[in-house]
Image (tube, rainbow, N blue to C red):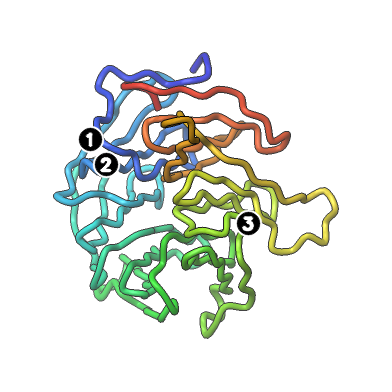
Amino acid sequence: MSGDRLEFENPIEDAVSRLRFSPQSNNLLVASWDSYLRLYDVESSSLSLELNSQAALLDCCFENESTSFTSGSDGFIRRYDLNAGTVDTIGRHDDISTSIVYSYEKGEVISTGFDEKIKFWDTRQRESLVFSTDAGGAVGCVTVSGNNLVVCVDASMHIYDLRNLDEAFQSYASQVEVPIRCITSVPYSRGYAVGSVDGRVAVDFPNTSCSSEIKYSFRCHPKSRNGRLDGVCINAIEFSPWYMSLIHHLMVHMIDHQTNSFLVATVGQGLL
């Protein structure tokens, strides 16, 4: 892939809710509000697969190169066979399912929702739901890093140890100070990048004992209206092997998270 942006012949017409780089290849998984899960080959900037899900998709994740999962506005957790192009349902939440991640430490899918539940699914078992616990509030998003599960409720971040889920071992308020819409782990670090509903992005470090790990935050403003900055929701943050991508509304920012500098901002149909 050359250049700073991907251009596709068939652009996504609705809001992108989540994108995930494959941990094993240069494939990119994209979930959107138009109910489609799409798989792209980043090297060729081509669409490899497109599957309809009958509901707006709010999050997605890889298990491996052939299997992925989504959480939907109808509460259902869906599994996708990316080789066969098939979709099935493994379970559901009692309200909107907001976020989903795959834990390689546990070999389980973890989902959250507005029903204030954190659910653990093992698709190797006859009964996929293996554990469920209360989150103490409607969960906006989650991320997992090793044995740490970070659950975001409003502007608060609660960190659980996957080996002991009785209660969060650490809780703190993010710098964004408003409800967190998305969160992801910073590679090769103990930090987390969060995006807010009002267009703010922050990199937080729960444990700042390392002096090189410094918190910072900034705003993303695609345009102004009537002389006022118009901040819009940050729907997704994802790290490529080189840069961090931010998705909000119809704009994509490429940022070097190590130097906290903008590299490129693009807007328009067909850009991702």
Other residues around mark 2 within 10 Å, as few (<14) / some (14–19) / many (≥20)? many
Is 81 on the left-hand or right-hand side of 215?
A: left
Mark number for residue 37?
2
Q: Residue at x 51, y 24 (%)?
A: 265
SS type, badge 2: strand
Proximity of marks 1 and 2: CB atoms separated by less than 8 Å = yes
Task: Give the CA separation, mark 2 to mark 3.
Answer: 31 Å
Query: Disc 1 residue type?
Result: Glu
Comparing marks 2 and 3, which lies closer to the viewer? 3
Query: Disc 2 residue type?
Result: Leu
Q: How many marks?
A: 3
Residue nearest the viewer, comparing 198 with 212 = 198
Mark number for residue 50?
1
26 vs 164: above or below: above
Q: Earlier in the sequence, mark 3 or mark 1?
A: 1
- Name the outermost residue toward the bottom: 166
Q: Quadrant of the C terminus?
A: top left
Residue nearest the viewer, comparing 31 with 176 = 176
Q: Residue at x 57, y 40 (%)?
A: 219
- Name the outermost residue toward the right: 211
Residue nearest the viewer, comparing 45 with 108 = 45
Residue, disc 3: 175
- Name the outermost residue toward the left: 54
Q: Earlier in the sequence, mark 2 or mark 3?
A: 2
Task: Give the CA separation, mark 1 to mark 2.
Answer: 6 Å
